[in-house]
């Protein structure tokens, strides 16, 4: 009995739909790119910076998605320590990435992102941090501000 011809149209992983494709966590992919850059001293730094930037943007996307889910479920305020930790880690990595990209360059990518996009993403993370964890007004300042809005003199 002859074997059937292999079907070239069948998906490689028939048990997975396109939305269920295995995904590599961005932090794992970043460590691979960093390892490759260390092993290949001839790898142009702008190319390594572009790869790391892409991975950092993926990490930020995942962070923002988890933020939205936590806010939608009403669970956001219950784990602010973890939120702050990951937010600061993204800010720290983004600052290093931006500094490297500005000093050593970044390879042009397809229209996916530019250095300005990286800067805007970094700025939005900083804004999130300062709004969520930055200094707050004292009770006295709040009363003065409230009085101004109510038309009272301070």
Image (tube, helix red, strand yellow):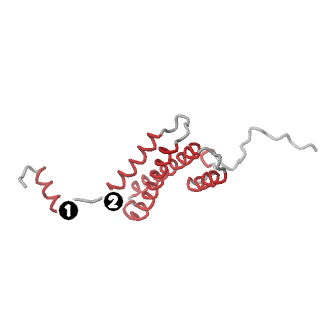
The residue where tag 1 is placed is 138
Q: Residue 46 location in percent, x, y? A: 56, 43
Q: CA distance from mark 2 to mark 1?
A: 14 Å
Q: Which secondary structure lies at badge 1?
A: loop
What's the mark number on residue 12?
none
**Residue displayed at 45% across by 56% down:** 92
Disc 2 vs disc 1: Cβ atoms closer than 8 Å?
no
**Quadrant location, the N terminus:** top right
Q: Residue 103 location in percent, x, y? A: 49, 45
| Depth order, front residue of 69/57 | 57
Q: Earlier in the sequence, mark 2 or mark 1?
A: 2
**Which image quadrant for residue 87?**
bottom left
What's the mark number on residue 133?
2
Name, please, the residue furthest toward the top.
111
| Depth order, front residue of 9/48 | 48
Q: Residue 31 location in percent, x, y? A: 59, 56
Neighbor class of circle 2 (other Cα within 10 Å; few <14, some 14-19, many 20+) is few
124 w.r.t. 7: above or below: below
Left or right: 116 in relation to 51:
left
**Which image quadrant for residue 85?**
bottom left
Left or right: 102 in relation to 12:
left
**Residue displayed at 65% across by 52% down:** 36
Q: Residue 19 location in percent, x, y? A: 59, 46
**Quadrant location, the C terminus:** bottom left
**Residue displayed at 44% across by 39% down:** 116
């Amino acid at each position: 009995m002859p074997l059937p011809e292999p079907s070239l149209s069948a998906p490689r992983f028939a048990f997975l739909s396109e939305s269920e494709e295995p995904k590599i966590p961005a932090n794992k992919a970043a460590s691979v790119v960093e390892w490759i850059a260390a092993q290949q001293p001839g790898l142009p730094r702008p190319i390594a910076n572009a790869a790391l930037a892409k991975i950092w943007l993926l990490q930020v996307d995942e962070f923002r998605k988890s933020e939205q889910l936590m806010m939608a479920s009403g669970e956001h305020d219950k784990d602010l320590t973890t939120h702050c930790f990951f937010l600061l880690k993204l800010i720290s990595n983004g600052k290093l990435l931006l500094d490297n990209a500005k000093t050593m360059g970044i390879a042009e990518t397809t229209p996916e992102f530019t250095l300005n996009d990286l800067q805007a993403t970094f700025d939005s993370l900083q804004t999130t941090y300062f709004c969520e964890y930055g200094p707050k007004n004292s009770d006295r300042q709040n009363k003065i501000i409230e009085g101004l809005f109510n038309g009272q003199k301070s």
